Structures are given as C-alpha cells and as structure tokens.
Image (cartoon, helix red, strand yellow):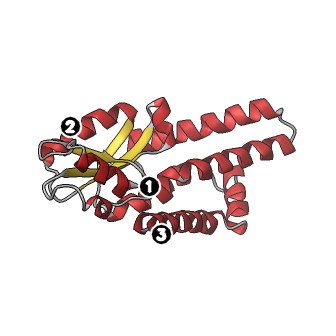
Amino acid sequence: MAEAIAQGLIRAGKVEAQHVLASAPTDRNLCHFRLLPPTARVLRVSPNLPCVVQEGAVVMARGRHAGSSEVKLLQTLLEACGQCEEVPEAHVDIHTGLSGSGVAFVCTFSEALAEGAVKMGMPSGLAHRIAAQTLLGTAKMLLQKGQHPAQLRTDVCTPGGTTIYGLHALEQGGLRAATMSAVEAATCRARELSRK
C-alpha cells in the first residue's frame, strides 16, 4: 500500500524535493518509500492511542534526507498529542510493542486490579475508577520525579506490609515475565509486518 501511494504521489507530481512526508502505518518502514525521489524527506512516525487525550507517546525516525528542521517541525506538531521523541528507526517497532500494544497490556492490568477489588467486595464501577486513577497517579509520579519504577515500588513497600505480600503474589504469578514476553511478542510481530 505504501508503495502504491508513493507511486501515485510521484505520478501526480505531488512529491517534490521541498515536501516532507510523514508515514504513520505500523507496517511500513522507511525502505517502503524508496520509489520517492531520492531527496524526499521522509519521517516514520509511531503514535499510540492516548494521543486522542493529548497523553500519547509518539516516536519518529528520520529518513536519509530528513534534516533537523523537518524533525523539529514534526515534533512541534506531534507534541500536541503528548510526548514525542526522535529515535533510530530500529526503535520504532519496539515502541509499537511497548507503547502501541502497551495500551492493551495496561488496560488488562487495570482490569485485573479492579477485578481483584471486586472479588474482595468493592462495587465494580468504583473499583475500575480507583484502578484507573492509581495507574494515572503512578504514571505522573514516575514522569514528574524521574524515578526508576523500582525506587517508587520500594518506597511503597513497608516491611511485612500489604504491598510486599501483594508483590510476592504477582511474582509467583509471573507478571514480570509475562509482561516482558508480551512486549517481545508484539515487537517481533511489528518487525514482521514492517518488512512485508
């Protein structure tokens, strides 16, 4: 599809040296735009769903001829959607596994937190609101304080307290390994799709 679009743009005379092309499809890497004029300034962009509430995580990788001014322009535009970082193209597929698919992983964890509270007797609506607020507050603390998650986790754990018991149960259930495997699987799939 990207090649068809590129060919159509070229034939229509719509892509010239002064144009900047930003590509967002997950399944297309910069190599898919080789049909464009050799000096085309192409950037590959990978957003995630929270962009719709201006809290997205967006990365972009520049093609061979995209310069700092194109990166700065696109970054300024994309920061309206949340955090935007320039990365090497090899990190775009990792971003898809971490942040694009990560939205579903976080929702699954939020749902599990709430279901645990429901199991213990809390009404469902309240449990889901508190779980979501806990995720939001934790994310803000990590971003604002710049702390490593392990430090914040340690700060919450009191010796012999509720949190360390709960963390032990999470580790027994394999949460860390399952989460790492989910990011790996999603990244590998993103790589497969972008090479087609």
Q: Are marks 2 and 3 in contact (CB under 8 Å)?
A: no
Residue at numbered disc 1: 26
Which badge, 2 or 3, is on the more N-terminal residue? 2
Residue at numbered disc 3: 192
Percent of width and height locating residue 83:
36, 40
Which badge, 1 or 2, is on the more N-terminal residue? 1
For residue 44, say whether it is visible. no
Label 3: few (<14), some (14–19) or many (≥20) C-alpha neighbours in 10 Å = few
Select label 2 or label 3 by which is in front.
3
Percent of width and height locating residue 34:
25, 62
Which badge, 3 or 1, is on the more N-terminal residue? 1
Residue under the image location 59 percent in, 62 percent down: 179
Percent of width and height locating residue 74:
25, 39
Specify the amino acid type for callout 3: Glu
Q: Measured along the vertical axis of the image, is residue 117 above or below residue 91?
A: above
Q: Are marks 3 and 1 in contact (CB under 8 Å)?
A: no
For residue 185, say whether it is visible. yes
Select label 1 or label 2 by which is in front.
1
**Depth check, front residue: 93 or 111:** 93
Left or right of 59? Residue 120 is: right
Specify the amino acid type for callout 1: Thr
Residue under the image location 20 percent in, 45 percent down: 15
Label 2: few (<14), some (14–19) or many (≥20) C-alpha neighbours in 10 Å = few
Q: How far apart in space, not on screen, are marks 3 and 1 (Cα)?
A: 10 Å
Specify the amino acid type for callout 2: Leu
Residue at numbered disc 2: 73
The circle drawn on residue 58 is none
